[in-house]
Amino acid sequence: MSFTNYLPIASTVLMFVFTASVFQRYIVRRNPAFLFWGIGLLMFGLGSFAEVYLNYAWSSFVFVLWYLFGAALNAAWIGQGTVFLLFKQPWVRVVTVILVVASIATTGLMLATPLDASKFQLGIAVSEQYRNIMPKGAPVRLTTPFFNIYGLIALVGGAIYSAFLFWRKRVLPNRVIGNVLIAAGALSIGAAASLTRLGYGEYLYVGELLAVILMYAGFVMAAAPSAVPAQAEQPQAAAGK
């Protein structure tokens, strides 16, 4: 078993700590943005946990868990949290309904997908062998790019937009840096996922760990207390409202 197979363990621990921090903020502020962030990050953590489990044993349930939460849905749910934080228009709720319905439909497709357990090889990262386990052209695989592209655009675009607003007004430099880190983390996992689809799955775990570290650091920095008067905090931040 290669060193990279141990990286999901670190990603899982960090992500669950990160998730707890976000849910705690939701409990205090009741902002739906943090609820969606927390759900998306929990999905990410469960996906990382599934990677750890599948390094040591096969389970069809855990494989489904990995594909749904680690490969398909988490980016879109995290990105939807950013959309909630940045925009208050009615269309946000419409997009939310679409996301929920699409997620339920994708879950149904995944549960209906036959898996070939005989193709599973112990000790090889699941991201490098999932194509052999799932049928070629499985409908659920066609849905994954839509979730990932939407999540990447929402999260990275939102973080960059927030950073620009704060930078332009010359206020809250910690949120500028924090949002840049969040965007960098999202880009790192996006790049790793793209490499996985091209057949270079060994980079996924590195990208995941880097994403967790950068996004968690960005969240902590963006959410840090500031001495700036409240009226200076009009722009929304991707993680610091």
Image (cartoon, rainbow, N blue to C red):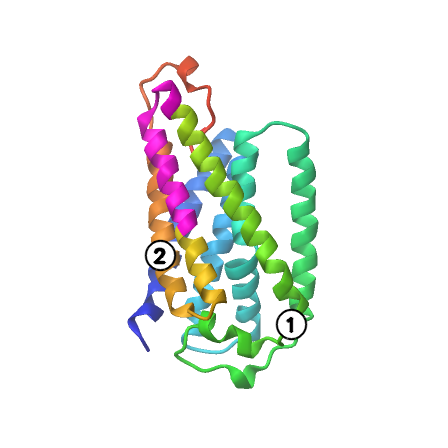
Please state, as top left, top right, bottom left or bottom right, where the N terminus lies in the image: bottom left
Residue positioned 65% across, 41% down in the render: 96
Q: Secondary structure at mark 2?
A: helix
Identify residue for label 1.
137
Residue drawn at the location 57% of the way across and 74% of the way down: 60
User: What amino acid type should be assigned to the residue bearing mark 2?
Assistant: Leu
Give the residues in magenta. 167-187
* Label 1: element kind: loop
Query: Is residue 26 left or right of 6 when viewed as pictured?
Result: right
Q: Is residue 74 visible?
A: yes
The residue at the far left in this view is 3
Find out whether residue 22 is within the magenta segment: no
Q: Residue at x 43, y 25 (%)?
A: 165
Q: Name the image quarter holding residue 124.
A: bottom left
Residue 130 drawn at (x, y percent)? 52, 73
| Residue designated by label 2 | 209
Q: Main secondary structure of the magenta part?
A: helix
